[in-house]
Image (tube, grey):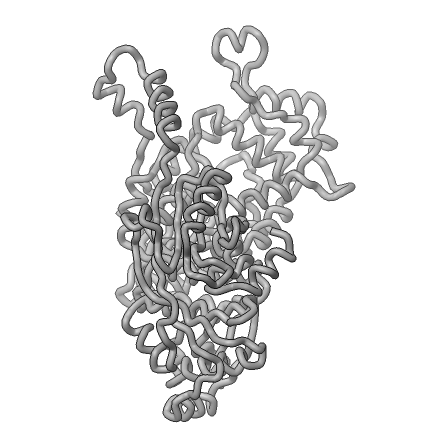
Amino acid sequence: MKPSEVQNVLTRAVVPEHSAVFMEAMSGGKAFLVGSYLFVAAEDWLVAVGYPLSGDEPSPEFEEALAEALRETRATRCWAVSPRLPARLQPHCTARDHYYTLAVDTTVPGRLQRQAARAAASLTVAEGTVFTSAHRQLWAEFLARVPLPPNVQELFARTEQVLSQAPGVVFLDAWDEQHQLAACLLLDMAPGRFMSYLIGAHSRLHYTAHASDLLFLEMLRLAQREHKEFVHLGLGVNDGIRRFKTKWRGIPAISYEVAAWEERTGVRGDMAELMRALRSMSSESMTKREFLASLPRQRRFAMLWELKKHDRRSWIGGTAHFFSCSFEYSFRELFERVETVLFEGPLDQMSLDRVEEVGRTPADGSQRLIDVLTEEEVRRLERVVCGPQGGWARLLGFSASKPPEVRPLLAETRPWMAFFSLWTSFLARHDWHYSVDLEAWRLSREMGKMVRGMETIDEQLETLESISVQRIVTFLRQCQHWRRYLKRNERAYLRGDVERMMGTSVEFPTRTELVINRRDARFLERMQPFLEAGRCAVLVGSAHLLNLRPMLAQAGFAVRKSR
């Protein structure tokens, strides 16, 4: 959407989901309009906001707009929110609720004013847009004790991302005299007529009575200052949240229904899929052995340690970007025991695309690997990465179907991008098609866990830029040893032997003090609040486990190999 279109939507917004930039930041999709209705889409999914920007009641026009959006995006995984779902979506309705609103000129009950005044005597209220370690600790503490539906948990998980990408989203914080965060609200000020209260939390570790009441009073004053007509307080969610909103005279003003469904591709699409499946089958029926052989190769995830502190259990495991088998069964078993899953950084498609875009656009005049390697070294690298080439290799089936273009990677991308691209192509040629961290990311989200990265993409890009070019060059020059290195690491990883994985004469470029040790301190700081709350799984690159296990022990956790 053009900036003028976004502004038009914000001016006419009726519900919090009409805040287009917030919706894009939250979902990673792109917003667009069909008539008076806003949609957000990416890849194979679509979110439909069935509240017309005209402010009228929903009409058959929503069904027409939805049909057009589905044709344009060809989405198969779909969600819709509406005051009243169309008849065809009613069987897919997953929840019904109301949006609660609070007029800015509401007379605040005297009791609440007095309670807020008592809290104000020991708290300082401030606005902010930076997600600090104090916010991270408050989020972890609050989520550990308050059961919330997955969509609300997702708001907490993506707070840092939303703050960095959606202008208008701000914190309203209450800090005590020891500079501890007692309570916090996350607000969206972008819509024209109203302000949206997105989420809030208060601390029991740094408790101040009525801190949340003080913030609600300040939120009303902020809305008045910004000339808003009312505050959108969001959904009722549960009895406790409803009671808090209604005591402030919030009213259930707008009905809400949500549907989740998979859109069928139609008879023609289904028939084409069936024909493809039939063509892929042999003329003979599949035996049990053949069926079992067709399933992903599964192994037990042994690179896992249990952490315990104050009778609260969590786990930390070592991942690999690529591996020779799947650990899905082990991950499903692990994630059944946790509520939160932490990764090094975000692994959604938008984040991965950003890394690739930066890697493929080197700065002018920066060093390129093609200028450092000799012609003989480049040819050897091509043989190792691409495998046998030429007519006889293709005839005998030894040739890779789509070998990477080694020379353009060395000449036209950043050194770390060339290294990772060549290394992963080599792994793929040896049937290492599984990604341990991506598999865990997908499963944890599929199972409704709170999923978050401990670093931002900018922090991860900074780490990639710090990788020594000389170490990359040394690693590429030793490519003839890669296969032996691969086999030894596979055996060690499957045994959960992190020390044996690290002991190698081939110097893997990312195993440096800057890339590993400095990040370990950052990871420890950001994971510790979640681990202390319990029921958390942390997944980091296996090399980080060398330092993190003793660091966690020093922090008071009992660390033992998980069985």
Instruction: Mark yes or no: residue 427 visible.
Output: yes
Residue at 44% in and 45% down: 64
- Picture quarter containing residue 477? top right
Residue 290 lies left or right of residue 56; in this view the side is left
Q: Where in the figure is residue 288, as x and y percent of width and height?
A: 21, 21
Depth check: give the residue in front, 473 or 455.
Answer: 455
Looking at the picture, does residue 406 appear above or below residue 100? above
Looking at the picture, does residue 450 appear above or below residue 388? below
Residue 407 lies left or right of residue 433; in this view the side is right
Looking at the picture, does residue 64 appear above or below residue 405? below
Counting the numbered discs, the total is 0
Residue found farthest to the right: 365
Q: Where in the figure is residue 56, as x and y percent of width and height?
A: 45, 62
Q: Where in the figure is residue 319, as x and y percent of width and height?
A: 42, 43
Depth check: give the residue in front, 551 or 172.
Answer: 172
Instruction: Mark yes or no: residue 562 visible.
Output: no
Residue at 28% in and 10% down: 283
Residue at 49% in and 53% down: 37
Q: Where in the figure is residue 475, as x and y percent of width and height?
A: 59, 34
Looking at the picture, does residue 203 appear above or below residue 516? below
